[in-house]
Image (spheres, rainbow, N blue to C red):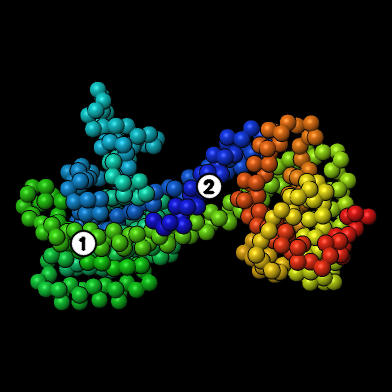
Amino acid sequence: MSLEWKRYCEMLRAARERLQNLQVDDPAIPVCIAGLARIESMLRRPLRITMLGEYNSGKTSVTDLLIGKGVLPISVVANTGVPVLVSHGSEPALFGVDQSGISIRIDGHDDDPLTDLDYRAVEIRMPLPWLETHQVLDTPATSTPAAFAAEADICVWCTVATRAWTESERNLWMAFPARCHRTAILVATHKDSFYSDDDCAQVLRRLTAITRGLFREVILLSAADPEAEAAGTIEADGGTFAEDAAALRAAIETSANSIRNRRLAKARNIVRRFARLTAHEFGQGAVRSEAQSILAKWQDLSERIFSEYALGRLPFERTIEALLHAFAQAAEVLRPGVVRSAGAPEPTPAALSSSEAYPATQRHAAMIQADLTAVLRILASGSRYESPAAREQREAARATIMALADLDGTFARIGHWLAASRSSDAGPAAQLNA
């Protein structure tokens, strides 16, 4: 699991808890908290690894190899005709999932385990660290394996190495959506059936060639028949199984990291947009009376600047510079020192025009205008009669929301640009003081 992914999850958690602990009476705050909780839950959701394949392809043994050889209760998994989900739990437990989706413990810990009900799935929970971030779904032999695609993050298709990748398997796999192919793994079982490493290498090359584009990776491993192993008829080579388990885990982690990276990029975009909307709503109904004229002047001037840009009379960079100068003057009037106290190393406004959040388009120039307006409204919010403690709480909420929206970086850039400017009163911004 990447350090970047962990850090971002912790950042979201810290921001959510900070907002929860603040005593700020504003309807935008609980909405923001709920949104952050949903995004955090999406990021932290365990990845579901779905074991697929035709009858007797070794799915259950591969599941056992992945979880930990001998840890999984094979007799339970191998003898059921319903899907078996292996997930994390504080203690080992066995549950039946009924037709309504309700989990009922059936391992005899209760007085009436209700083992005769018609369950649609079985869930095994075990206190294994790896299961905190992964789930494994072992599917029964079925003619429609694609039915499990919707909730699968990583598909592992099991095939017997001695007759690997039959036409029927190909037809079944081609029913899966293309998104499954990007992270899928083809596992050829029964490697121990071959006499030499050369034979194994030849099979691996053939499978890689004929399934190119259908799987992210192809691996060959030994997976004993679960019923034979349970009966004690298989003497497994512990070293071989350890190597195969490591190879399987490594293949899964490669796919898992690509999924987490996509989730992380998506989460960052959603958080930025969501936090900007929160900033726009925060303090909407609490603008101080003495600040209304400043906001009105800013609104008039910023709209004129943007109109000049929309008509092609101002380039993007000069438009942003004019908006920032006008914004800075309004912000300093509303709360002296709030802009000039923020310094940054960026030498020119070009950094903003080329940033991920604000590319140089008319739509995003309008977004900058709206975001700066939202920040000014936040600075103008609250009452002159509110206590220092209440003001401090509101300021903490503002800072948290701006950091999530990446608007705090805008403040830092403004401070530097003003310091480097020939005159802080030059251009359209001077009209704020008129």
| Position in image of residue 170 (x %, y %) | 31, 67
Residue 286 badge: none
Q: Position of residue 223 (x, y in %)?
A: 17, 58
The amino acid type found where label 1 is placed reads: Asp
Which of the 4 image quadrants contains residue 312? bottom right
- The answer to whether any part of residue 218 appears in the image is yes
Please provide percent x and percent y for residue 131: 32, 47
On screen, residue 213 above or below 221: below
Closer-to-camera residue (62/17): 17
| Mark 1 or 2, closer to the camera | 2
Residue under pointer 2: 12
Rounded to the nearest angstrom, the CA distance separating label 1 from label 2 is 37 Å
- Label 2 secondary element: helix
Disc on the earlier residue, 1 or 2: 2
* The C terminus lies in quadrant: bottom right
Q: Residues within 10 Å of mark 1 (few under 14, many from 20)?
A: many
Name the residue at 19% across, 58% down: 242
Q: Which residue is mark 1?
A: 244
